[in-house]
Image (cartoon, helix red, strand yellow):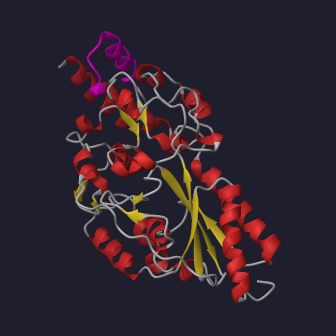
Amino acid sequence: MSQPLTAARSTALRARLEELANELGFAAVGVADLRLEADAARLERWLEAGYHGEMQYMQRHGTRRSRPAELVPGTLRVISVRMNCWPPGATPPAQVLADGNQAYIARYALGRDYHRILRSRLQALATRLAEEFGSFGYRAFVDSAPVLEKPLARNAGLGWIGRHTNLVSTTAGSLFVLGELYTDLPVAADAPATDHCGSCHACIEACPTRAIVAPYELDARRCISYLTIEYHGSIPESLRPAIGNRIFGCDDCLLACPWNKFAGQAADPGFRARHGLDAPDLIALLRWSEAEYLARTEGSALRRLGYWRWRRNLAIALGNAPPSPAIRAALAVAGDDPHPIVREHVAWALQRQWA
């Protein structure tokens, strides 16, 4: 910093941090220390079990994921923020999930890409702090680097890591997204949040594919979010029926958590559903050309799928839909898709439709 961070300035900075975070639309902010040894050991066991599936990037970065100062030299603290992402006015999840002719998209992905929303706000937060307290070293992250965002958010007091391995807050549930500022500011850290799951196992029982193999332990290879978003291969046939009509991610374990009775809706208009994607018709989505897909997912997290995985996921949902001549006709047209994995999933879906 351009001026020493005295005790008085540290106190003033911490108070101003709260004010600026609120002004910029963050639901909460906290300051984390860098003690992640237990989390590093847990991550290592998770990787050794193969639960990361094809997410090889989880292994590539070595200790930098659990040692922030190795990723960004000079880091002393991590400013962790959370932002509500539940889209106001969107069709209720239960209504969409109950209609096999509609597609379910994870609610955080219905509007603009949250990475863009949070990153711009984090940059604004750092700029404002520098203007008022002097320049300092920092780097902003939003699920974009080897960062243990949930353990850091826990250390910052923003919530605990629940049995479903997502962050939970007693005042905000878990319907939010996270971002971080790695910084060289020696400001006092907050106390870590404590676990309040109690004896509840609702999230484990709610998982359609039984991906939560033990409390606080997720096998990503069975997780619908991993299968529909991260995985690039042919989705195992044994898991396809349980995917239902979920074509991008899954909210089931979050929706089951009783703490979400305290969850707030997104204040940022960027999270509002676009193009009717909160309750879209499966056949209509399958008929999108690649140009339509690119146009309607511009600036959205949905773009990361690419056209062929989008159609692969739609084929599974249509295979799980109530049998109908309209669906069979739409699948028949898609049967000549240029991508072999799409054709294989369409063939499976047709077989299910004719069964």
Please give the count of numbered marks on the rendered protein: 0
Residue 272 x %, y %: 58, 36
Q: Is residue 32 above or below residue 219?
A: below
Q: Which residues are magenta?
A: 319-336
Viewer-side residue, 143 vs 60: 143
Viewer-side residue, 73 vs 107: 107
Question: Is residue 306 left or right of 170 when viewed as pictured?
Answer: right
Q: Is residue 339 above or below residue 101?
A: below
Question: Is residue 53 left or right of 238 when viewed as pictured?
Answer: right
Question: Is residue 179 left or right of 238 when viewed as pictured?
Answer: right
Instruction: Name the quadrant containing residue 49.
Output: bottom left
Q: Is residue 10 above or below residue 57?
A: below
Instruction: Determine if residue 41 is in view.
Output: yes
Q: Residue at x 24, y 20 (%)?
A: 353
Residue 195 x %, y %: 34, 67
Instruction: Name the quadrant containing residue 224.
Output: top left
Q: Is residue 129 magenta?
A: no
Viewer-side residue, 169 vs 102: 169
Instruction: Determine if residue 231 is in view.
Output: no
Q: Is residue 329 magenta?
A: yes
Q: Is residue 214 above or below residue 245?
A: below
Question: Is residue 233 left or right of 126 when viewed as pictured?
Answer: left
Q: Residue at x 28, y 50 (%)?
A: 203
Quarter holding the C terminus?
top left
Looking at the magenta stretch, what is its main secondary structure? helix
Residue projecting furthest to the left = 355
Instruction: Name the quadrant containing residue 269.
Output: top right
